[in-house]
Image (cartoon, helix red, strand yellow):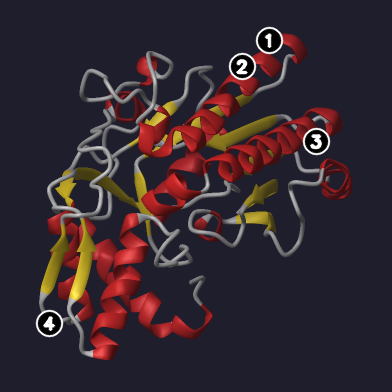
Amino acid sequence: MLEKTLITGGTGLVGSAINASNKLSSKDLNLLDPQKTLEMFGELQPEKVIHCAAKVGGLGGNMNHLGEYYYKNIMINTNVLEACRKIGVKKVISFLSTCVFPDKVTYPITEDQFHNGEPHPSNFSYAYAKRMVEVQSRAYNKQYGTNYMCVIPTNIYGPHDNFDLDNGHVAPALIHRCYLAMQNNEDLVVWGSGKPLREFIYSEDVAKLSEWALENYEEDEPIIFSTMEEVSIAELVDSIVKHMGFKGKVVWDKSKPDGQFKKPASNKKLLSYLPNYDFISLDEGMGRTVEWFKSNYPEVRK
């Protein structure tokens, strides 16, 4: 149990898996409100904060809500960091995403390439908002002597995700789509060609690594959480179909965009600290996620 530690986004994908004394959800506090954010942080008086909360979506959400996602994430991040500064929080870990990295980059992506070009156009506004968390953290560290840093997980999946068909990330949206195809005895229709590659990491692993970083990671530069195992979207669908028990036809809608083709991220820095870390495999993690989804379908975010 992380004592005197506050988790924003505490009931979400990662926050729900972190073992901490205080967790805030959007039902507890509107992080877009600076005064209420400051008041709540002042009341709870955390010594450390893991900042998971964000306005997020999948490819469709990012492309259709560019201004909204930018504004809300900038405001959420600013309000959280400013509240932490004003009440004297000793350490903050903020979550970024690999979408912050440039579209044109040397693979595998490493932490030092963070600001070396424009992000992919499919999610540029969300990516820039996330980049600004890192900029703001460094700026606060230099001016105020704070200890704020960032972690960059690859594609997270697991229980308590947002399984919205249009605005969820790729894995949860596909799980939900597969479930409905089974229920309605329909084809499973998937956007794109299935060829793009992604690195998936289970939420429990991200939670454990976040707890480790809060206690042990002290570099100003962000650190990537990655398994270094690339999986195609087609392979992801195969895993979901297997664990869901779907026997129908998978149809690839190639009229829809694929998004960025690949963005492999290096875990060299992470493994220099934790050389023997044993990641949960995609097969095991997907099995757990699908089972949780089916068992909790009426209550899941969708």
Q: Where is residue 125 in the image (x, y as percent from the top left)?
A: 50, 34
Q: Which amino acid does label 1 sit on?
A: Lys
Q: Which secondary structure, mark 1?
A: helix
Question: Residue 27 vs residue 106: left or right?
Answer: right
* Callout 2 touching callout 3 (CB < 8 Å): no
Residues packed near mark 1 inside 10 Å, few (<14), some (14 to 19) or many (20 plus): few
- Residue picked out by circle 2: 138
Q: Sequence order check: which comes first, mark 4 or mark 3?
A: 3
Disc on the earlier residue, 3 or 1: 3
Which numbered disc flags the more N-terminal residue, 4 or 1? 1
- Residue 32 visible in the shown view: yes
Q: Give yes or no for contact between labels 4 and 3 (Cβ–Cβ under 8 Å).
A: no
Q: Distance between the residues labelled 2 and 3?
A: 16 Å
Mark 2 or 4: the one toward you: 4
- Residue at numbered disc 3: 83
Question: In terms of secondary structure, where does tag 4 sit?
Answer: loop
Q: Is residue 278 above or below residue 177?
A: above
- Of the two numbered discs 4 and 1 in the rendering, the one whose residue sits closer to the viewer: 4
| Mark 1 vs 2: CB contact within 8 A | yes
Q: Distance between the residues labelled 4 and 3?
A: 51 Å
Q: Is residue 52 left or right of residue 153?
A: right
Residue marked by disc 4: 248
Residue drawn at x 34%, y 33% as measured from the top left: 274
Which label is found at residue 142?
1
> Which badge, 2 or 3, is on the more N-terminal residue?
3
Q: Residue at x 75, y 37 (%)?
A: 79
